[in-house]
Amino acid sequence: MATVAAPAVERENYLNTDYGIRSWLLTVDHKRIAILYLISITFMFFIGGFFATMIRLELLTPAGDLMSSDTYNKMFTMHGVTMVWWFLIPSIPAVLGNFLVPLMVGAKDMAFPKINLASWYLFMISAGLLLYVMLTGGIDTGWTFYVPFSTSYSNSHVIAAGVAVFINGFSTIFTGLNFVVTIHRMRAPGMTWSRLPLFLWSNYANAVIMLLATPVLAIVLVLVALERAFGIGFFTPQLGGDPLLFQHLFWFYSHPAVYIMILPSMGVVSEVVSTFCRKRIFGYAFVALASIAIAVLGFLVWAHHMFVSGMSAYAAMVFSLLSYCVAVPSAIKVFNWTSTMYKGSISMATPMLYAMGFIGLFTMGGLTGLFVAALGVDVHVTDTYFIVAHFHYILVGGAVMGYMAGIHFWWPKITGRMYSEVWGKIAAGVIFIGFNLTFFPQFVLGYLGMPRRYHAYPPEFQVLNTLSTAGASILAVGYLLPLLYLLFSLKYGEVATDNPWGATGLEWRTTSPPPTANFEESPVVTWEAYDYSSIPEVPVAR
Amino acid sequence: MHGSTEVVAGHALEHHFADMGQQRAAATLGMWVFLITEVLFFGGMITAYLVYRVAFYDAWKVGSEHMEFWKGTINTVLLLCSSFTMVLAVWASQVGKKNLLVLFLCITMLFGIGFEAVKGVEYYNHFREGSVPGQFWHLDIEGADVPHVQLFFVIYFVITGFHALHLAIGIGILGVLAFQAWKGKFTPYYNNPIEITGLYWHFVDIVWIFLYPLLYLISRKHT
């Protein structure tokens, strides 16, 4: 049985095989690449958080007094660009996915380890370029790069930022490519599709979206850059182009990109809910196929971002209806998670708190998504804070909560150490309170008609804005806490057992942290997913 | 399972695969998945071409009349021939005929280089004619809808430019493969790189098979 004291001689694992800098920078081990990504995106998260802080500070008072309107434009643009492409999209896939996909299928590594490393280098090059853009004056187009402003009028670094996003896109594609091929071709004997953990189903669906959507973003950015550099008219009306074509191509990528951000979190929540209820997930097949359905339907709803941009009433009706349809698989997941909890043996560990936060906040984000899928309501609230609140409920209340749940859930496996459960619970509570205080007032603000992307507003909106800014400062504390206690746990945390939560995945059947080759001997799977009778009795730290 | 393969292949099996069959299947699927992303990449441009063609048909007609039909046709033939020699190269690698493999890879490269040369001449003629959008534009088209004719040429240069870039990358890869083949790296048990490069090469050809009618055949004046 597992001993409580640390063994005298540390077992060989992927962290202690080699400590040299070259062994990290030239590694092809998917687990080390995941760590590289973890450090990089955490850095970018706090950069994006800095811009969010500036936005909320400016909006504390009605007058635009902290910064000029131009500076404010740059702040929200760089907040959006950083958070979308350098944090949310890579967050779970590139960190947890990289670490877990080979472990969960029972393989030694990703199908293409060198491409995996190349993905990180592309990410770093693009991040460097983005930092250069930030330090030399920034970009002010909004994260959507809408033409003709981005091509003809903006005096900021549109081309450099576009190139950064373009390169970043290739790192995304490489990750997605590895996921698809690894899940198809590298599964251990007995690991059939119907036995795959739901984390893999959602990351598979997610990889498909990455592969199909990102190239369209790439081409549209190339065209914007060419138009801006050479003065040729692709999207600019006076030169013969059509700005609506830009919006169609951009949202053909960027709406599926929302699902790129949320689907992996759904996978994490499925794992966490099952583990901390000690029950097989309710309706496994439906949860798995709902991921695929979201991937497919997600490609058919992009024009709901353009209801006020000009399109035929019939097209708008079709896109509105399809947008309702995509709510169905999302709802299936929410209902199945709650059904799993029903009569489960629930333990309120930190990952479970985050997962429950996800379920509640994602439901609110999803339901307000139905509001804005309705044509009439959408026209009323387009470009108001209602939209801002809606997508932050999905992307922060959903995606980031899921990411935090996953980081805490797999922290013992990744690092071999337990974090402080008390601090974990406190931070989860602080984040939940801070998040709601930040963004719930924005629903009201938007419905009352406060437009987004302005640095000043009428005085009657001040109370709600002050509440929002106060919430943002609580949220900031909530995000700094895990940074501190997780780092603290690396040295002082209790040594983790191989399976501290009593979970069923293959990753919990190897040592913590795993050896470089992942398993002592290649696993053979003879049990169904989430079969709690298949794991040996272990002392559980829950 | 595939013990005999492993012994023969020896060094060619990477550490994280169980056997050569798995390695080959992974590499092939990886290339197919990559090509799907390429379909979307070119698909975005072809969509833009078609949307604008419907919207600005008259301008598209004027633009199409400035395409060099015969050069486009010659290039189509060159690429089709290159696909054939590429297939022969894959075959040669499968049956282990080393010299033939090097030969066919080189011929495929030559066809590709021929395509690029013809394309270069075409670009040069467009430049002289003044049909390069932007500051070099001085095409003499009386009464035509000049902004939209320019738009046609923007798409033409972007889409054929990206195609030519893909072909150039393919030629480079073939060069490396030909050198490695000459050094004897490929055997009937290990020829993945040849096979998946073949997939890539055929894909680049197929893109041209779409571009050729769109750019050179439809909307032309019938003489």
Image: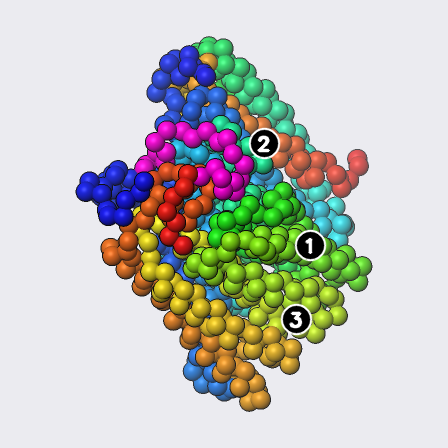
Q: Pointer 2: what residue?
A: B203
Left or right side of A92 for B155:
right
From the top left corner, tell me how far across and down residue B107 is, in percent: 50, 19
Q: Pointer 3: what residue?
A: A382
Report in which chain the residue with disc 2 lies.
B
Q: CA distance from mark 3 to mark 2?
A: 42 Å
Q: Amino acid at mark 2?
A: Phe
Quadrant of the rendered structure where residue A9 is? top left
Q: Amino acid at mark 3?
A: Thr
Q: Amino acid at mark 1?
A: Val
Res B155 label: none
From the top left corner, tell me how far across and down residue A476 is, in percent: 40, 71
Report in which chain the residue with disc 1 lies.
A
Q: Residue A65: in sight, yes or no?
A: yes
**Residue A520, magenta (yes or no):** yes
Find the magenta span and give its range: A515-535
Report in which chain the residue with disc 3 lies.
A
Q: Which tag is nearer the camera, tag 1 or tag 3?
A: 1
Task: State if disc 2 and disc 3 touch (CB < 8 Å).
Answer: no
Q: CA distance from mark 1 to mark 3?
A: 23 Å
Image point (36%, 60%), residue name: A421
Q: Residue A135: in sight, yes or no?
A: no
Q: Pointer 1: what residue?
A: A328
For mark 2, give the secondary structure: helix
Q: Which tag is nearer the camera, tag 3 or tag 2?
A: 3
Q: What residue occupies the far bottom of the structure in this picture?
A: A459
